[in-house]
């Protein structure tokens, strides 16, 4: 059935142009408002096509790179989108998006390049044995961290927890336990994306931005309203996205 889907089936079904029969890399954004994310990325990529079953997945070009960009909220959707990109030839997948900070020294708009994705997402279990660890590609992590730091972002490198229940399932007790375990952040997609990449031999990493410091009870229900905080948030979001895009383009095999 669907697990046995081939690239040829996708090309034929969705009439994918020859230029995109083999993409170089994919960037997946974990966000619940796809319209905003897609608008930003349509400005970054050229020759965009989107003949796909996912309304929030596009293919486009940047420099020499053929890049897939998609938006998925939650692990199951992220896994399906990552699998689609893998079938279309992506050799590198980079997860971007947002995390709840689990360490007290963090602050909003800090960036996290996870060393590992901790699996409580559910979707990764469909592709990997429970004991399989999802260690991010070291060289790609080093590249993401170095570039983002050079651009002026505060960057952390710690394990990232991915959960299945959604943000409204998180309790104070859980957050305290996750913090004590040394996890840097919690999100809903990273482990699922990493699982697909790991299963099929792709290079993978993530660069995520702190949306709220949940370990300090600084939540999304307490929005920061001062101009400096908003400006820092937008600046670091741009750093996250541009850093990921540069790394994705480096996967191109074209001269």
Image (cartoon, helix red, strand yellow):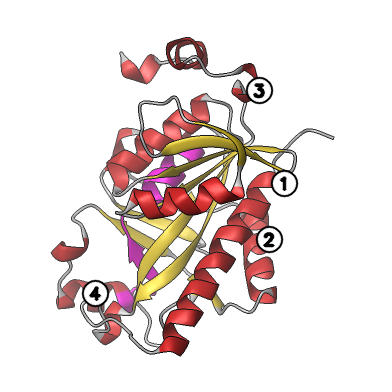
Tag 3 or tag 2, which sits nearer the N-term? 3
Which quadrant: the N terminus? top left
- Label ID, residue 143: 2
Q: Mark 1 points at which residue?
A: 250
Mark 1: which secondary structure? loop
Residue plotted at (35% across, 55% down): 31
How would you rate the neighbour count of disc 2 (Cα within 10 Å): few for under 14, some for 14-19, many for 20 or more? some
Q: In which quarter of the image is residue 140?
A: bottom right
Which residue is found at the position 47% from the left and 58% from the top?
116
Residue denoted by label 4: 175
Whether the residues at callouts 2 and 4 have beta carbons within 8 Å, the answer is no
Mark whose residue sits in front, 1 or 3:
3
Where does residue 221 sit, x and y in percent of width and height? 20, 77
Q: Give yes or no for contact between labels 2 and 1 (Cβ–Cβ under 8 Å).
A: yes
Q: Which one is earlier in the sequence, the residue at label 1 or at label 3?
A: 3
Question: What is the spatial separation of the Cα atoms under label 3 and label 4, in whole angstroms?
Answer: 46 Å
Q: Say which mark, if any, is on residue 19.
A: 3
Residue 220 pos. (x, y %): 25, 75
Q: How far apart are marks 2 and 4 (CA)?
A: 30 Å
Residue 155 in the magenta stretch? The answer is no
Label located before the other in sequence (2 or 4): 2
Read off the magenta span: 179-197
Mark 2 or 4, which is nearer the eye?
Answer: 2
């Amino acid at each position: 059935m669907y697990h046995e889907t081939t690239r040829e089936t996708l090309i034929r079904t969705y009439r994918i142009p020859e230029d995109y029969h083999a993409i170089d890399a994919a960037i997946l954004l974990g966000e619940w408002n796809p319209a905003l994310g897609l608008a930003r990325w349509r400005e970054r990529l050229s020759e965009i096509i989107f003949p796909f079953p996912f309304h929030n997945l596009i293919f486009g070009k940047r420099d020499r790179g053929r890049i897939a960009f998609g938006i998925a909220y939650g692990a199951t959707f992220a896994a399906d989108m990552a699998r689609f990109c893998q079938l279309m030839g992506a050799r590198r997948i980079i997860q971007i998006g947002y995390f709840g900070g689990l360490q007290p020294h963090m602050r909003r708009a800090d960036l996290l390049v996870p060393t590992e994705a901790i699996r409580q997402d559910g979707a990764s279990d469909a592709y990997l044995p429970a004991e399989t660890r999802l260690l991010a590609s070291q060289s790609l992590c080093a590249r993401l961290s170095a570039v983002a730091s050079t651009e002026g972002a505060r960057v952390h490198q710690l394990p990232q927890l991915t959960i299945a229940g959604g943000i409204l399932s998180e309790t104070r007790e859980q957050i305290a336990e996750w913090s004590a375990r040394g996890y840097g952040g919690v999100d809903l997609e990273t482990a699922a994306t990493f699982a697909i990449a790991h299963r099929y031999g792709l290079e993978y990493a993530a660069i995520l931005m702190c949306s709220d410091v949940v370990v300090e009870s600084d939540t999304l229900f307490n929005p920061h309203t001062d101009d400096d905080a908003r400006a820092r948030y937008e600046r670091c979001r741009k750093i996250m996205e541009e850093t990921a895009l540069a790394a994705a383009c480096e996967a191109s095999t074209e001269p």
